[in-house]
Image (tube, rainbow, N blue to C red):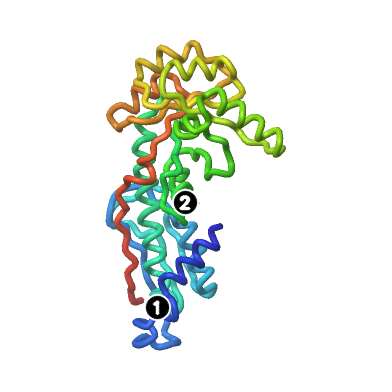
């Protein structure tokens, strides 16, 4: 998946050639460049950058000074790359685009994880990602200290409000999901979203799911219903959770909190790849 993403990104950016470099940089020219940090935050995407350089030009030599997950500050040097000047120029923007976004996600994730310090609750991402590069964004969440929810539609059954409404209710949706797993012989976990205590009671009356998502419940509402949910169900809180309220949600004792903003509302970390001369 990573290789395919890199290949598509290179095709998108280079097309039939990097004509800026081809027109003025000698074919055999050798160059050096440093990746410089211009924001404080959590670094992410170094391992990916190495894959990009290797895939485009395996003769490029990269000396890494700071690894993924490192807390960085303005002026830090992440790595130096040496080799074909044309190759460095051709990969520069792709490396920066991925690393800036991944570092922004990792930084935001790390900030939110720190708000949960001392609680057992795990912070989850969602599928609210950029189409085509979800793997990179969920990778960045892990680097920042968060955890991945399902990757896509195929690796978990998640019965949300629209599924429930289309299926005719909570109980029909759960029954059909379990029948589907038996018929297809698939081993997938089932999560169901509940919007109120009535729907929660319906889930508890039938069981047959692995995780219950309490959607748009307040912390007080969660404290009220948690004692009636058996321990064999995982419990996730989601919806309407902000930086100001997330600690109060975690203190309820829920197993997971999912936050779409990890991957859809972040600020990229400013990074720059600059040529230098020895």
65 w.r.t. 208: above or below: below
The residue singled out by tag 2 in the image is: 134
248 w.r.t. 180: above or below: above
| Circle 1 Cα neighbour tier, 10 Å, few/some/many (<14 / 14–19 / ≥20) | some
Q: Quadrant of residue 96?
A: bottom left
The residue singled out by tag 1 in the image is: 31
Where's residue 15, x and y in %?
Answer: 44, 76
The mark found on residue 213 in the picture is none
* Residue in the picture at 67% in, 36% down: 187
| Circle 2 Cα neighbour tier, 10 Å, few/some/many (<14 / 14–19 / ≥20) | some
Residue 96 in sight:
yes
Q: Quadrant of residue 237?
A: top left
Where's residue 218, x and y in %?
Answer: 34, 21
Quadrant containing the C terminus is: bottom left
**Mark toward the start of the polypeptide (1 vs 2):** 1
* Residue in the picture at 35% in, 49% down: 104
Please tell me whether mark 1 sits on a helix, a strand or a loop. strand
Quadrant containing the N terminus is: bottom right
Front residue of this view, candidates 165 and 236: 165
């Amino acid at each position: 998946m990573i290789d395919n993403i890199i290949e598509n990104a290179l095709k998108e950016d280079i097309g039939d050639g990097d004509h800026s470099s081809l027109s003025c940089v000698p074919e055999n020219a050798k160059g050096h460049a440093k990746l410089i940090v211009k924001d404080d935050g959590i670094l992410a995407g170094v391992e990916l950058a190495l894959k990009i350089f290797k895939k485009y030009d395996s003769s490029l030599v990269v000396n890494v000074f700071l690894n993924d997950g490192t807390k960085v500050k303005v002026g830090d040097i992440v790595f130096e790359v040496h080799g074909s000047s044309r190759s460095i120029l051709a990969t520069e923007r792709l490396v920066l685009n991925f690393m800036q976004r991944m570092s922004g996600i990792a930084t935001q994730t790390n900030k939110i994880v720190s708000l949960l310090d001392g609680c057992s609750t795990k912070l989850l991402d969602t599928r609210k990602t950029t189409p085509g590069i979800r793997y990179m964004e969920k990778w960045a969440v892990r680097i920042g200290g968060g955890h991945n929810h399902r990757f896509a539609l195929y690796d978990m059954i998640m019965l949300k409000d629209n599924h429930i409404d289309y299926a005719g209710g909570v109980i029909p949706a759960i029954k059909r999901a379990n029948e589907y797993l038996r018929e297809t012989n698939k081993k997938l976990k089932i999560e169901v979203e509940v919007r109120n205590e009535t729907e929660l009671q319906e889930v508890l009356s039938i069981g047959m799911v692995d995780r219950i998502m309490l959607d748009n419940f307040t912390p007080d509402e969660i404290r009220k219903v948690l004692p009636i949910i058996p321990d064999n169900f995982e419990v996730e809180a989601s919806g309407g959770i902000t930086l100001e309220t997330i600690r109060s949600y975690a203190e309820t004792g829920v197993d997971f909190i999912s936050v779409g903003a990890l991957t859809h509302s972040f600020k990229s970390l400013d990074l720059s790849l600059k040529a230098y001369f020895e």
